[in-house]
Amino acid sequence: MIQASAGSRCVTVTTTEEKPAIDIDDVDLEFIEIIKKTGGPNIQNCYQCGACSGSCPAGALTNFLVRCIIRKALLGLKEEVISSPDLWYCTTCYACTDRCPQDVKPTDVIKAIRNIAVAEGYMLGPHQKVAAKVVEAAHAVPLDKESWQNLRVKVGLEPVPPNASGNPWAIDEIRKITKKSGFEKLIGYEEFMKAQKEKAKKKAEEKKAQKEAEEKKAQKKE
Ligand code: SF4
Ligand code: SF4
């Protein structure tokens, strides 16, 4: 097999004597039905014109090809689609949805597939971080840095905007909702926070060790 792989772009070349590119055991036709029921009812209208990928700002900067994801989904390649980091590159700008001549609504298809991916334990780290912020601070992008808050005060604003993240009562309520609804479990909140704490601890230890090494070096010079 000649494989010219660039990220997950559809550029695998298979010679005639090689096995087919798709293994029938990897095909899950139920996948299309789930997508159709959960946000992408028109996915089978796609005739692969490429207008979506041609409009896509995320695709202009990365290997992300929304048309390719839709094609693979239509082929039933569930595992390949839901485990691909590319799935998370979409910014949900809706340019593809505006331009799709077949009313596939690719943005909604991507969102439906993301929901399936998360339910099966696949989520990209930065997205997990944002979801954890909703649990922790009742806002996906809370203004929780002192420097940002100082900047707001400097221009005559309250340190925190008047949203849930500035209200301890609302934070408590949202925490109850995220727990009871199963959102925390879905995004792996506890495990994620534990890993974050360990990461921060390791970073602090490394910083301390580096500082001590620099101090020793400076003392030797004296
Ligand atoms: S623009 Fe619509 S029809 Fe064309 S490839 Fe994209 S999803 Fe398919
Ligand atoms: S919604 Fe997503 S897939 Fe569609 S054009 Fe925007 S970034 Fe690309």
Image (cartoon, rainbow, N blue to C red):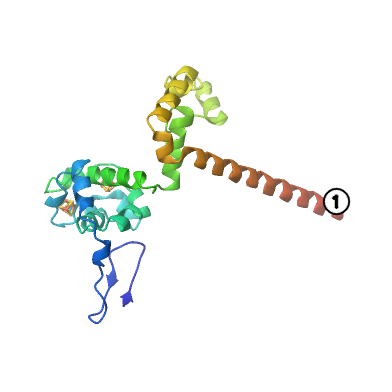
For badge 1, the amino acid type reads Gln
Q: Residue at x 14, y 46 (%)?
A: 42
Q: Is residue 91 visible?
A: no
> To which quarter of the image does residue 162 belong?
top left
Given the current orientation, which residue lies at the most extreme right position? Answer: 222
Give the percent coordinates (x, y) of residue 211. Answer: 74, 47
Left or right relative to 73: residue 117: right
Left or right relative to 155: residue 198: right
> In front here: 65 or 113?
113
Q: Is residue 148 visible?
A: yes
Give the quadrant of the N terminus. Answer: bottom left
* Disc 1: which residue: 219
Give the percent coordinates (x, y) of residue 62. Answer: 35, 56
Give the percent coordinates (x, y) of residue 201. Answer: 64, 43
Q: Residue at x 24, y 56 (%)?
A: 28
Give the percent coordinates (x, y) of residue 84. Answer: 35, 55
> In front here: 100 or 151?
100
Mark 1 Cα shell of 10 Å, populated few (<14), some (14-19), many (≥20)? few
